[in-house]
Image (tube, helix red, strand yellow):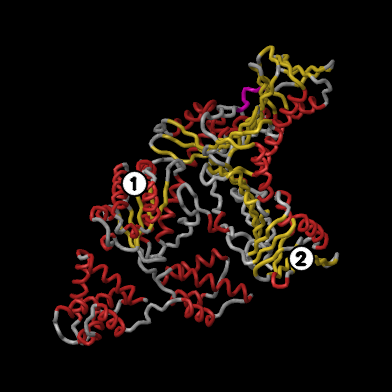
Amino acid sequence: MSFPLSNRELWQNALVQIELGTSEASFRTWFKNTDIAGRSSGVVQVAVPSKIVKEWLVEKHNKLVLKALRGLDASIRSVEYVVHRAPAAAERRPARVQAPENASLDLDNLYIDKRDNLNPRYTFETFVVGPFNQLAHAAAKAVIERPGLAYNPLFVYGATGRGKTHLIQAVGNRFKKTHASKKVLYVTSERFSVDYLNAVRAGRANSFKDQYRAYDILVMDDVQFIANTEKTQEELFHLFNTLYDNNKQIVFSSDKHPAMLSGLEERLRGRFSAGMIAEIPEPDMESRIAIIKAKLDQHGFSIPEDIILYIAENVRGNIRELEGILNMIVCRSQLKGKGVTQADVRALIKHNIKPNRGISVEEVVRRIASYYEVNEKSIYEKTRKKEVVKPRQVIMYMLREEFSVSYPSIGEKLGGRDHTTVIHSCEKIKEEIKSNTSLEQEIDHLRTLIHS
Amino acid sequence: MRASTTKEKILGGVLIAERLTGKKETLPTLSCILLEVSGKTIVLRATNLEAGVEVVVPGEVDEKGIIAVPAIVLSQTLRSTHGDKVTLSAEDGNLLIESRGTKTVIKGMPHDEFPTLSPPTDGKGENVSREQLLRGLQAVSYAASPSMIRPELGSIYLLVGATGVICVATDSFRLAEKMIGSSERGEEVLLPLRHALELSHVLEHAEGAQVKLTADESQLSVSADGVRFISRIVDGTFPNYKEIVPKIFSTEATVLKSDLSEMLKKARVFSGNDQHIGFHVYPSRKIFSATARSADIGEMSDSLDAALSGEDLDINFHIGYLADCLPTIESDSIILGFSGAGKPLVIRGVSDPSFTYLVMPLNR
């Protein structure tokens, strides 16, 4: 469907018509601060400032409004009136008059809309887009354009601190803003299971179903935590089907690709993969710089370019850590009352960020070998005993995946093997993980073992 | 139209309604009170489009009718009327007021553009004690922000549940919470401060022990005996304030409310324009003292009798923020719960868990 006029233009033109059909006094009283909140399939929603105005327009001016709108767009069939969600624009002036010397309660982090659990801080405006998250961002935008139709479900995954929650909450927030009458819900999978358990315990399982099925957009965060919960998964499965069949948008986030999620039923896994899967990988250098600059802007703070570069180079991966470092820098320089030097920043990073490359190949071999209870030396030897081959392949896989060591150098370190051998081993493990959940769990354990 | 009633009753109703008339010039009829005579009552209605009120005044009705007259003229006229009994009648679109030999004619205004107030929804709604709701609003309204820049801070948060009502207001420097009954879940409403003050006024002058609160997604309606008040509510999110109320204190002091109030009065004189006061709480030496100074006036240092526990602490506050809450605390002694520098102070009445006041210290 294409609209020749934007909502704003449509309403402005309609107002001209309406003004001609009514007295000036009543026009100025009843049509001040009105706007079009949204429209879909022939129904236009007009936002009005209060219920009194709403009732008046319904009773006295409905015909006039409808006629004016239809004159501009013949596809419009009816008009609905909704009361503004936001206060009148004139009241919103960003100025603070209060005494600045008094500390204020830390309320900013406590704004969570209880109806939909969305945190209004997470918006697209504050989301920094770079090459690394471009795909996820574009998918999210497409979802907003055509909810339920473009990509359903949208599945976003990536490691912690990459901005998954920010992105999916931004979808919810934007949708809430553009479609005043639609219902959005943000829920973590953990909360979903707890809610479900409580509902079952209280004998309200049916009302639980109805409640969740009433939403137009369901955003579920950290869906990996639903693993190994049989009943909750079943409930989610049915909920998914209902929403999906009614073209309601569903958005998931997780720390892994759906195929890699262990303890998840096959039918659910399949459904997760049915729409669009977008990964948010590690941010690249340019994106990190952009993120740092955006965060500094929020603080109203500036630091020299070379320090920004230094931080971007040395704090990788986790955006949350990046924020933490910036907060410390801002706090420190405010305390000292002068700018920070590169030496300060270096010290800060050294003390606060866990180095993720500080582990040697030998150490990895030692840990994995001891996990599989094989002799460390046998890994380097040219033996093809079955109990050694598997750990060796796992080691190669881990070195490749976790530390991005090149294939030739992995081969060289592990007793002078050819790089094709290494490639074969990595591919083999990669394939096996997909079908073998116990191997997957082993890899998970090893991952924590190596990084601890 | 023709009806008669007592002056006291009609004047009371007009005074409530007058405050809610619109000052907007766009629609002159909004500055009027609409008198609707039917059955056995005279209904007065006024609205400024954001809030509105309907007052039912009992009287003897001879003939039905509707008329709108400017609120100011009507209230002035009734105030200066001497008789006990007042007769209202319509004559050529004007309102004729007769009382013990005086006759006044007020020019009527066209009333066909006078807004209607949505009828009360039946069934739903919670009954609350009128007096307690009034006290609840008064206990917190001073803590709301006078500006609507951030609508949730310029409003009073009401949680209307089946077993009680919770009123909360904050301007981010302090926060006041008053619980009437106990209520965990219920309808959440953000009532703009301006309308909350009007509601207090209406509640103060209404009669009857109970009022009924009904909230939907866009308005709050409060019905008392003979009065119905409605107000637009703000759509916003009130911060989840419970999380910032400290549960354990590092320093606690119990003092007499009157002592603290006296001390603040004195400190106000010496603190000059800043209105700063420093508290020095030393449980180790059993000292609770306060200092205030200004370059032009001088300085004061007072100590109070207090029961103290916890760690030693020096902390500064704005006097106004501290003093605001004292009149609403009903107990004689109060507990000050400190959580260290830069953390909010909690003030509560001893043996009164229904009221909690949080105030942030000064930065320096």
Total count of labels: 2
- Quadrant containing the N terminus of chain B is top right
Region of the chain picked out in magenta, as a range: B110-115
Q: Nearer the viewer, residue B339 or B343?
A: B339
Foreground tag (1 vs 2): 2
Question: Which element carries disc 2, helix, strand or loop?
Answer: strand
Question: On the image, which quarter does residue A366 sit in?
Answer: bottom left
Q: Main secondary structure of the magenta part?
A: loop
- Please check the rendered image and state whether residue B112 is part of the magenta-colored stretch, yes or no: yes
Q: Which residue is mark 1?
A: A148
Callout 1–callout 2 Cβ contact below 8 Å: no
**Three-letter code for the amino acid on which mark 2 is drawn:** Ala
**Three-letter code for the amino acid on which mark 1 is drawn:** Gly
Q: Nearer the viewer, residue A398 or B200?
A: B200
Above-or-below relation of A345 to A251: below
Chain for numbered disc 2: B
- Quadrant containing the C terminus of chain B is bottom right
Look at 29% across and 43% down and name the residue there.
A245
In the image, is B106 to the left or to the right of B175? right
In the image, is B249 to the left or to the right of B89? left
In the image, is A429 to the left or to the right of B265? left
- Please check the rendered image and state whether residue A108 is part of the magenta-colored stretch, yes or no: no
Label at residue B290: 2
Question: On the image, which quarter does residue B36 sit in?
Answer: top right
Look at 85% across and 64% down and name the residue there.
B297
Residue B239 on image: x %, y %: 55, 53
Question: Which element carries disc 1, helix, strand or loop?
Answer: loop
